Image (cartoon, helix red, strand yellow):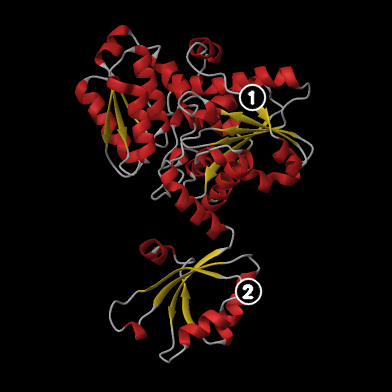
Amino acid sequence: MSEDKLVDKPALDIDGAAKRLKPVVNHTPLQFNANLSRKYQCRVYLKREDLQIVRSYKLRGAYNMMSQLTPSQLAKGVVCASAGNHAQGFAYSCKKLNVKGVVFMPIPSPQQKVSQTKMFGEDFVEVKLVGDTFDDTAVAAKAYTLEHGMTFIPPFDHPAIIEGQATVGVEILEDYNQLEQEPIDYMFVPIGGGGLSAGLGYYFKEKSPHTKIIGLEPEGAPSMLAALKAGHPVMLENIDKFVDGASVKRIGDYTFSICKDALDDMHLVPEGKICTTILQMYNEEAIVVEPAGAMSIAALDDYAAQIKGKTIVCIVSGGNNDIARMQEIKERSLIYEGLKYYFLIRFAQRPGALKEFVNKVLGPEDDITRFEYIQKHNKEAGPALVGLELKSKADYAALMENMKQYQINYNEINKDDNIYGYLI
């Protein structure tokens, strides 16, 4: 669809979707969180879609759409493109409906999500790894769909998908109205392609118009924010794929048609902040969240003044976090928190230069976490890659002062994304 031709806001049968999904999905809990409530001096509830059957809300939209296909369409089979969570919901739906499905996933998809997709679909699904991003994968999947006369089940941009995701909101209001009399003041919602935010926004504007809907995107993939600024969906040239469940180059046409009116605010969350939140939720709450699922909680610091004394719902959208990514998550968190730094250092060509650096430049609690010469020959004249972990963010100023005092020849590569990407 061309960017200057906007689709009309669709009519959604959310109550019908809720009835279709009731025997299939878990009614996930809406949990009051005492620690977050104390920290922000408000009432924070977590909608735990990480506890869904496939560990994300994506099952809702996939099953809602597939369950409405004709017997002829189901007999020919279905296709989807997904970075992981939609694939798992799709696969589970294929097995539940006894339908053949083909899943296209980006090549860099976490192995955990690939394995889970195969587990949920069993013999009913085939997985094909194609392309570097979701958008590349979607092109291949749609071509395959046409070639084989199958039905494409999109991850977000279809009214039936949006209806299904909206049932998260049906459950929230059902549970909340049994607990409290006052309305929900703020709801924080992660956005990738916009299916969840469109569904929740549509439902809450009708059933709880007092609630402010805050849309959240990772800093490296602001496709909804770009669309809102432009007045229509736009294709981003480059995105950071780290938050794989919420990193798309272009949000949907149907989702934009709803979100442009339903969202009260849009906010970008740094990837490093998301990583810090993942670690905090694991260590303090024993909750495993994936990067997209952590965004709603990660954003609270930036809204602390506004939400004080209010009632908040954070959508924990998924918990499919591959344990193999934890080292990268920790690294990104430390860098964001100002505790981890990398330098290229040319040590002076004299005896004792390295010893002087360790004893005089580094602080008493600074830790060398990586040291290697970049140049393989004539190491005495070549630069060394040095990774340092600090005890406190405040120690950085003293480190820089010591570097200057002892005339250390260095380049800090945290601040150069290209060099950091090559070396770290």
Q: State the residue in front, 334 or 260.
A: 334
What residue does disc 2 label? Answer: 397
Location of residue 324 in the rendering, given as x and y in whole percent from the top left corner: 41, 46
Vertical order, 195 against 276 (above or below): above
Vertical order, 51 against 277 (above or below): above
Q: Which image quadrant for residue 253?
A: top left
Q: Residue at x 53, y 40 (%)?
A: 228
Q: Residue at x 28, y 42 (%)?
A: 131
Q: Count neighbours of disc 2 (C-alpha within 10 A) and say few if under 14, some if 14 to 19, many if 20 or more.
A: few
The label nearer to you, 1 versus 2, is 2
Three-letter amino acid code at the position of disc 1: Lys
Inspect this view and state whether residue 153 appears: no
User: How far apart, in angstroms, are the residues tagged by discs 1 and 2?
Assistant: 48 Å
Three-letter amino acid code at the position of disc 2: Ala
Q: Count neighbours of disc 1 (C-alpha within 10 A) and say few if under 14, some if 14 to 19, many if 20 or more.
A: some
Q: Which mark is residue 130?
A: none
Vertical order, 95 against 332 (above or below): above
Q: State the residue in front, 211 or 393.
A: 393
Location of residue 258 in the rendering, given as x and y in whole percent from the top left corner: 54, 28
Residue furthest out toward the top: 71
